[in-house]
């Protein structure tokens, strides 16, 4: 098990959220579910935590209560190999109440922030030609969901 992993605080939807994430991302699975016991602050038998894995990264979803909410101060960056992967993840994560933001950012229906980013964006932005890197940066800053073809055209035309 990895030494450090994120713990995501939910208000009663930890199991639902974990199941959503493992159904959304390939190479994902539920690892363990724990329940509140007698004498604990929650209702005995209710789900306390769900440990799950996405592409080898462990997460814990905790039913902690209403005290804390997700903010954009923390987000998960997903490196995508193709436009099809960007589109699939974008559509899944913005469905059922998720919200689009700018520059590849979104919030899912639980309020968790994600950045859905094609690998080619970073390749273009690292180009030693500042005109190409700037053209790509300008192009993606106008987008919500990132479009690789638009990035490629900005790069080629710079």
Image (cartoon, helix red, strand yellow):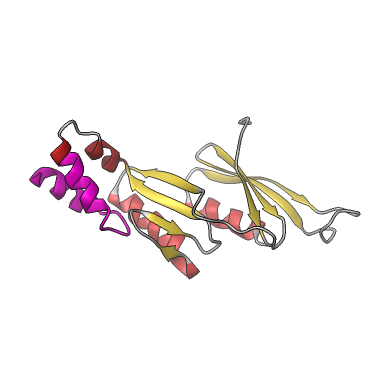
- Against 97, is 61 above or below? above
58 lies left or right of 128: right
Q: Quadrant of the C terminus?
A: top left
Residue 8 horizontal/vertical position (percent): 62, 50
- Label the magenta part by its dominant secondary structure: helix
Q: Which residue is situated farthest in the left direction here? A: 157
Residue 10 % position (x, y): 65, 58
In front: 98, or 54?
98
**Residue 112 at x, y percent in the picture:** 53, 56
Give left or right: position of 121 versus 4. left
Give the camera-side residue of 144 and 137: 137
Q: Which of these two is toward me, 81 or 101?
A: 101
Q: Residue at x 44, y 60 (%)?
A: 92
Q: Residue at x 58, y 46 (%)?
A: 29
Identify the residue shown where x is 20% and y is 33%: 127
The residue at 29%/39% (across/down) is: 122
- The answer to which image quadrant residue 43 occupies is bottom right
Work out whether 18 lies above or below 31: below
User: Residue 157: x and y, percent?
Assistant: 8, 46
Q: Is 138 in the magenta?
A: yes
As for residue 34 lying within the magenta part, the answer is: no
Which range is magenta? 132-158
């Amino acid at each position: 098990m990895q030494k450090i992993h994120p713990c995501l605080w939910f208000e009663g939807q930890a199991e639902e959220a974990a199941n959503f994430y493992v159904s959304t991302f390939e190479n994902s699975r539920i690892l363990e579910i724990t329940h509140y016991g007698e004498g604990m602050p929650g209702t005995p038998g209710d789900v306390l935590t769900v440990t799950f894995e996405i592409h080898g990264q462990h997460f814990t979803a905790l039913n902690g209560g209403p005290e804390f909410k997700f903010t954009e101060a923390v987000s998960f960056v997903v490196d995508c190999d193709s436009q099809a992967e960007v589109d699939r993840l974008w559509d899944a994560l913005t469905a059922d109440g998720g919200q689009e933001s700018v520059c590849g950012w979104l919030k899912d229906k639980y309020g968790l922030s994600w950045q859905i980013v094609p690998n080619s964006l970073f390749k273009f932005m690292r180009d030693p030609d500042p005109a190409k890197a700037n053209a790509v940066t300008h192009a993606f800053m106008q987008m919500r969901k990132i479009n690789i073809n638009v990035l490629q055209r900005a790069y080629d035309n710079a």
